[in-house]
Amino acid sequence: NRGFGSTVVLTDSGGMIIGCRDANSTSLYHYKHYKSEGGFVFSQKIKLSGNGSFELGNRVVVDGKVMAAGSTNVIIYTEVENKWRAVAEISPPPLSQDFGKKPALLRNIVMVPSSSNVHRYSFSTGRCLGLEGRLEVEVLQRSAAFGDMDDNDPRKLALNWILNDDGMNLRADSENLNQRFVLTLLAFSLNFEALEHATIDTLTGSEYVYSEWLSDTDECTWFGVTCSEGVVVAVELADCSLIGTLPPEIGMLGSLEVLDLSSNCLFGTIPTEFGLLSNLMYLDFKDNGLSGYIPDSFFDLKSLVRLDLSYNANYDSNCTGSNGEIFEVPISFGIEGTILEDKIENLRYLMDIDLTDNYFSGTITPKISALKNLERLVVDNNVFKSTIPNEITKLENIRELWLSMNYFTGKIPDDIGNLRSLESFSMWGNEDLTGHIPDSLYDLTMLEDLHLFRNSFSGSISTQIGRLTKLKTLTLAENKFTGTLPTELGLCQDLEFLRIEMTDIEGSAPKEVCDLTEKNLFSDDRDKEYFKADCLEDNVTMVAFFVCDCCSSCCDHVTNQCKILD
């Protein structure tokens, strides 16, 4: 005998299942299965009652359809949506019917036991399934079994809650069993305290009222959970003081479209099983402490539209739970891997990628051009090391391109001007970037923010800069730029922030530029360094390298010491 939930399965010495019954039942149904050479199959059923008497009956299987003997007719069953359902009635054949030659014993035949608590038969395991058995076969990952787990394992805790504390009283054939178990597992894996006490809330402008997690209500009403026709399609638990690691079983929420666990305290790695979430469109893990390599299966998420893995470098080893308790967690340097190499072309629906503040490395593949819908690519503060492929200029819908604080080399792509929708372009902090600003950059007339400081760019600033009339921020500092500041910069009437210090830009600030301080180029309690240049007299010549009567902050061109002006 071996127990599977509340089901008892008996096998013969050869391992064949010969009976299934409810553990609390007083009767046992014994099955003998036969097959003739002609392919016809029948099964003889014997009911052994508690007093030892025998009740004979029949089970017949023809061409994969299961038939049960009735008083006068045989009912044909088929499996529909994982349940056995009656599809027809026929007159029963006599048990003595000639099937040709002597029947041979048939193993692994589908059985329909009378026990109300046995609902499925697994061909992969060759056994009848109760609630626990179904979860082991259909949900648990990595060959896990409940019997091998200690009592504090989140999976075991989730099972015990489903069996003993859940007022829903689910059965093995309950359609929502798997998803309710996975959500329960998520609660036990990520600090049950937080989700148990999630406030019952009404969304602004919405009629929906959420229930607490691990309550007796439908899991589709739990805080942050959204369902479509009873199936979980979204889990949104941003900033809920969640602490813990992601269980691989989360990959069993196969209809999930939105997963937002941002601004929590997740640590550990992203499970390989994430690749099973084929419908996932929105994934937000920003502001956590995840680490390890991005799994290859990640590139199977072909429905993904938005990906935010930013700010997972976490140097604080303490996290505070919802009840104020302090938890010690591992320090993380962020998620690793070569995420922007060739496999990224599989994720063709991506519109938004944010990888800021991690440990991603490698190159940006020329195949990035396959992401035709991409509107935002932000990879600041990682360890990418490559040239910037010219193919990136084929991303015609991109509005925000931030490549700052990496190890990119080479120059700005010559065809950068093809990105006519670009509004924000940041490449600061890549000290091996060299060359001149390509003329095509001045075709980016939608540009509002241009950050090129702390690189090794050279050459002069073109008079064409006056074409960038929407420009609000221009940072050219800490480069090798030469020449003078063009008067045409005064055409950028919306300019709010201008940095040209620690360059070789000389001469004086044009009146047209200084006039901008009467418009938007001023402090108004914002950054006092809104206009910064090498306008401080040096200690040797007592002459400023750049003359500026309207700057808010000046630097010594020789010593690079700076001060804010009164």
Image: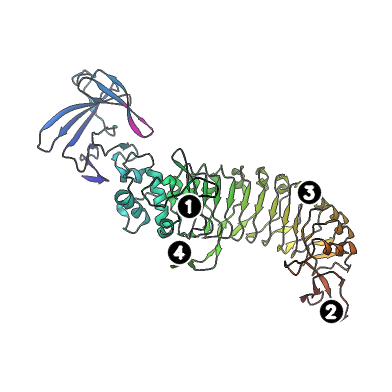
- Displayed quadrant of residue 436: bottom right
Within-10-Å neighbours for mark 3: few <14, some 14–19, many 20+: some
- Residue designated by label 4: 321
Amino acid residing under circle 1: Asp
Circle 1 sits in a helix, a strand or a loop, which is it? loop
Q: Which residue is rendered at x = 45% and y = 58% of the image?
A: 245
- Residue designated by label 3: 417
Camera-nearest label, 2 or 4 = 4
- Residue designated by label 1: 201
Q: Where is residue 397 in the image (x, y as percent from the top left)?
A: 70, 45
Upstream in the sequence, badge 3 or badge 2? 3
- Residue designated by label 2: 538
Residues under numbered marks 1 and 4 in contact, where contact means CB atoms less than 8 Å apart: no
- Left or right: residue 76 versus residue 353 is left
The answer to which of 117 and 128 lies nearer the viewer is 117
When the figure is inspected, residue 474 is found, relative to residue 158, above or below; the finding is below
Circle 2 sits in a helix, a strand or a loop, which is it? loop
Query: Would you say residue 340 is visible in this rendering?
Result: no
Q: Could you tell me which quadrant the C terminus lies in? A: bottom right
Circle 4 sits in a helix, a strand or a loop, which is it? loop
- Left or right: residue 373 versus residue 92 is right
Q: What stretch is highlighted in magenta?
A: 77-84
Camera-nearest label, 3 or 4 = 4
The CA span between labels 2 and 4 is 54 Å
Camera-nearest label, 3 or 1 = 1
Q: Where is residue 75 in the image (x, y as percent from the top left)?
A: 27, 23
Upstream in the sequence, badge 3 or badge 4? 4
Upstream in the sequence, badge 3 or badge 1? 1
Q: Which residue is rendered at x = 83% and y = 57% of the image?
A: 493
